Amino acid sequence: MMTDFVRQLPGSLPSDVQTLRGLRIAVVYGAVSEEDAVYIHSAPRAEWSLTAIMRVLQDHGLDAEHLDPTAPDFAERVRGFDAAFVNVHGPYGEDGRLQGLLEYLNVPYTGSGVLAGSVGMDKLVCKAIFRHLGLATPRDSGLLAGQIPAGFPLPGMLKAVDGGSSVGTRLVDNSAQIAEAIREFTGRGFRRYFLEEFIAGRALTVAVIGGPAGSVALAPLEFVTEAAFYDEASKLGGASAPSVQYQFPEDLPPSVVKAMSVGAEAAYDFLDCRGAIRVDYIVDDAETVYALEINTIPGLQPHSNLPAACARAGIPYDALVLRLLAQAVRAHRPVPWAAPGRPRPESA
């Protein structure tokens, strides 16, 4: 039960630290994608999630080092570590490619595996999974020569298939706006797009973490913004960004909370996720719950969504960080060619 898991997790901190004692830990963080680059360049280093994660690990006497995944010698260096805390987002960080490299190098890593990462990063595949699980998701359509499909309701959301943090997302009303958005997205490196029905409603997210008896959904968190939707500027910040507030709504009907929680846990389990994920939703005025996407590496700034949901459930930030890493180490299965007891290579 969630209450049992929440009650026990902070108390397990000493055992999590013991699991990690003596290991060389790489905290993988760097601008592998536009999504990460915007985060990194929009905030001082003191506010980076890297800074908070390193503080937790070092405060508990653990051997942790920051590795930049864009460095030319990254692959050679990371193989010399005993575990990796993966803290990168978007393409090349969250889409299964980095996870596949770490698996091949036999390095335990935080977060979900190759399958879940690749599905979560592809919005169309993700929506197909939602439908398979019986979850409602907004109507969508491919685009032919940038033309709006006959009968498609407007306004609509033009989305890059592999965009993250609403990077590559635009609210459009006509073909001219679609063409303009496609030109912009193409210039930013995106190649695949689709049109999604715009659902006016409340934007919410549900975090799920892996517990000893299975996945556990935390309380829904709502994004309240003055923008037309929870857009890139609202998410990534900046001086001219629309204001946004995060709150735990008390007025959601129990049926809506249950639908979001059950759906998020179902997605977590079906994709064999590990660690923590988030599932984003829109709830319309008729209280219909629409699943939008899965985030397999939620942000870990202390004030961001996952830590906020954990804090509300009684899980301190330090306990969250240590549990994600210790869980990854305990769950690791060596690659077949890694002989038991084989010494790990020295780092470069």
Image (spheres, grey):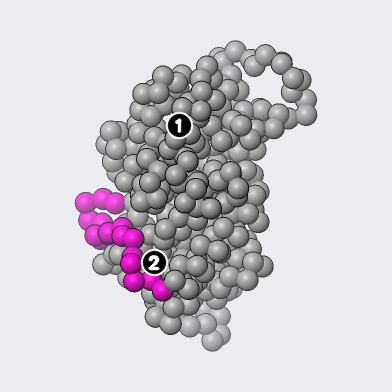
Residue at 46 percent of width and 27 percent of height: 14
Type of secondary structure dominating the magenta stretch: loop
Residue that carries the numbered disc 1 in the rendered image:
13
Kindly give the residue lying farthest to the bottom in the view shown.
Answer: 151
Q: Which amino acid does label 2 sit on?
A: Ala
Within the image, what quadrant is residue 247 found in? bottom left
Name the residue: 59% across, 54% down. 268
Marks 1/2 in contact by CB < 8 Å: the verdict is: no
Relative to 281, 129 lies left or right: right
Q: Residue at image x 56%, y 64%?
A: 263
Q: In which quarter of the image is residue 38?
A: top left
Asked whether the viewer can see residue 6, the reply is yes
Question: How much space separates mark 1 and mark 2, taking CA atoms?
Answer: 33 Å
User: The residue under label 1 is which amino acid type?
Assistant: Leu
Q: Position of residue 307 (x, y in %)?
A: 38, 46
Residue identified by numbered label 2: 203
Q: Residues within 10 Å of mark 1 (few under 14, many from 20)?
A: some
Find out whether residue 19 is within the magenta segment.
no
Residue at the location (38% across, 29% down)?
A: 56
Q: Which mark is residue 61?
A: none
Is 242 in the magenta?
yes
Judging depth in this view, the residue of 252 and 275 nearest the camera is 252
Horizontal arrangement in the rendering, residue 348 relative to residue 61 (left or right) = right
User: 258 and 183: which one is in front?
Assistant: 258
**Between residues 34 and 254, which one lies in front from this camera angle?**
254
Q: Give the range drawn in magenta.
A: 237-253
Percent across and percent down for residue 138 are: 52, 74
Secondary structure beneath label 1: helix
Residue 35 visible: no
Can you tell which of label 1 and label 2 is closer to the viewer?
A: 1
* Mark closest to the chain's N terminus, 1 or 2: 1
